[in-house]
Image (cartoon, helix red, strand yellow):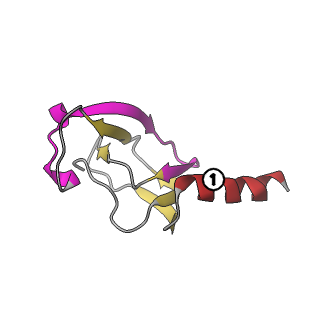
Amino acid sequence: FPSHDSGGAKVSLNYYIDTSEDETIFYTPKDGIVREDYYQYEFNELNVVCSFSAKSGEAYLLNINELHSVTKKDDKTRVFLQYSWNEDYEIVLESLQGLVDS
């Protein structure tokens, strides 16, 4: 998938069931490059911030309001459960940590 934000939701908790080890990559635009739409960025206009390849059975809390892409390793469909919030990442993380710490 090309660089994108996930439109609407800001944060998601993804539990991966079948991933084919696709790579999710997060970016920031290079200095001085601003586009109105995330889909207008070319990959050479972006700096990689971090990336991961989820394995089946893993869960990730993601700030999907940030610019990211998914690089497919094969033609298999990714299967995952997703719970989304329209809150800032820090607020969601803090609320979930409260559940884990209790």
Residue 74 appears in which quarter of the rendering? top left
How many labels were placed on the picture?
Answer: 1
Find the residue positioned furthest to the front: 32
- Looking at this view, is 69 or 48 the one in front? 48
- For this view, does 82 lie left or right of residue 27? right
Residue 7 pos. (x, y %):
33, 65
Q: Which residue is mark 1?
A: 93
In the picture shown, does residue 9 fall above or below 50? below
User: Which residue appears at 24% of the width and 50% of the height?
Assistant: 1
- Determine the secondary structure under disc 1: helix
- For this view, does 47 lie left or right of residue 50? left
Magenta-colored stretch includes residue 52: yes
Q: Quadrant of the C terminus?
A: bottom right
In the picture shown, does residue 66 fall above or below 79? above
Dot 1: within a 10 Å radius of its alpha carbon, few (fewer than 14), some, or many (20 or more) residues?
A: some
Q: Which residues are magenta?
A: 38-62
User: Which residue appears at 77% of the width and 59% of the height?
Assistant: 99
Residue 89 pos. (x, y %):
54, 54
User: Which residue appears at 18% of the width and 53% of the height?
Assistant: 39
